Amino acid sequence: MVGIRRIFIGRNTVIGARSWLNVNDRSGSGPALKIGNHCFIGQSNFITVGEAVEIGDYCLTGRGCSFIGATHVYENPMQPYLSTGVTSSHIIRVGANCFFGLGAQVIGNISIGHGCVIGAGAVVRADVPPFSLVVGNPARVIKRFDFSRNRWIKWPDSSYVEGPSETDYVAHLQSTAGAPVHHISAAAGVFRDIL
């Protein structure tokens, strides 16, 4: 963790081995990186914060996921990029109970709604509405969960019925799931990491 003073990790949350959490602006006050309650951040994840990264409660990431809210300044190729500094204006917001498959990436100024599934290897470069299934590079919505039919449906669909608000959704998750038991062996680099 780089910039730990500006990192907040919620209750019952696991961070996988070899993950890198990086707050670039360490001079500010208050958390710039917030990871909610009951999350499981898989092994070898990479999070770099521009202005802010917020990951909601109950989120699950597979191995090798990236949340890239900052990049090196590259306007002048006559300077070493290593010394040009980083961008600091992007905000990444991930709603509650999102699942990111192996190697998924979120890049830039992005909002991902609650209840989403981001497919393995997907590269998210645009906002994603709640209860969406996205795949590909660039990621595109291929299904959404329709609450009138109680199933995932192909997208687009003109008769789609929206789901609950994020507040109501989190209240439902808390009342039905509570604090899930994490399989910490999945987060460990080697079994000796587990005590």
Image: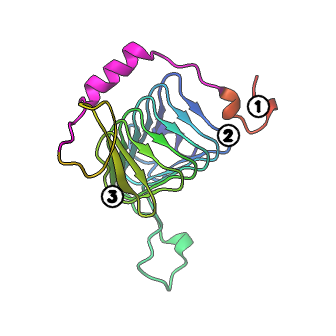
How far apart in space, not on screen, are marks 3 and 2 (Cα)?
Answer: 29 Å
Residue 27 at x, y = what percent? 43, 48
Against 110, is 42 above or below? above
Sequence-wise first label, 1 or 2? 2
How far apart in space, not on screen, are marks 1 and 2 (Cα)?
Answer: 9 Å
Residue 44 at x, y = what percent? 64, 47
Q: What's the amino acid at mark 2?
A: Ala
Disc 3 target residue: 126
Mark 2 neighbour density, 10 Å: few (under 14) some (14–19) many (20 or more): some
Where are the magenta residues, as a range?
Answer: 159-183
Residue 87 at x, y = what percent? 40, 63
Against 9, is 74 above or below? below
The front one of 28 and 187 is 187
Disc 2 target residue: 17
* Number of the label disc, if any, that sits on residue 80: none
Quadrant in which residue 188 is drawn: top right
Disc 1 target residue: 193
Q: What's the amino acid at mark 1?
A: Asp
User: Which residue is located at x 32 percent, y 50 percent?
Assistant: 128
The front one of 139 and 32 is 139
The front one of 1 and 107 is 107
Quarter that holds the N terminus: top right
Sequence-wise first label, 1 or 3? 3
Q: Do the residues labelled 1 and 3 touch (CB within 8 Å)?
A: no
Q: Are marks 1 and 2 in contact (CB under 8 Å)?
A: yes
Sequence-wise first label, 3 or 2? 2
Q: What's the amino acid at mark 3?
A: Ala
Q: Disc 1 vs disc 3: which is toward the camera?
A: 3
Q: Say how the picture is coloured.
A: rainbow
How far apart in space, not on screen, are marks 1 and 3 (Cα)?
Answer: 37 Å
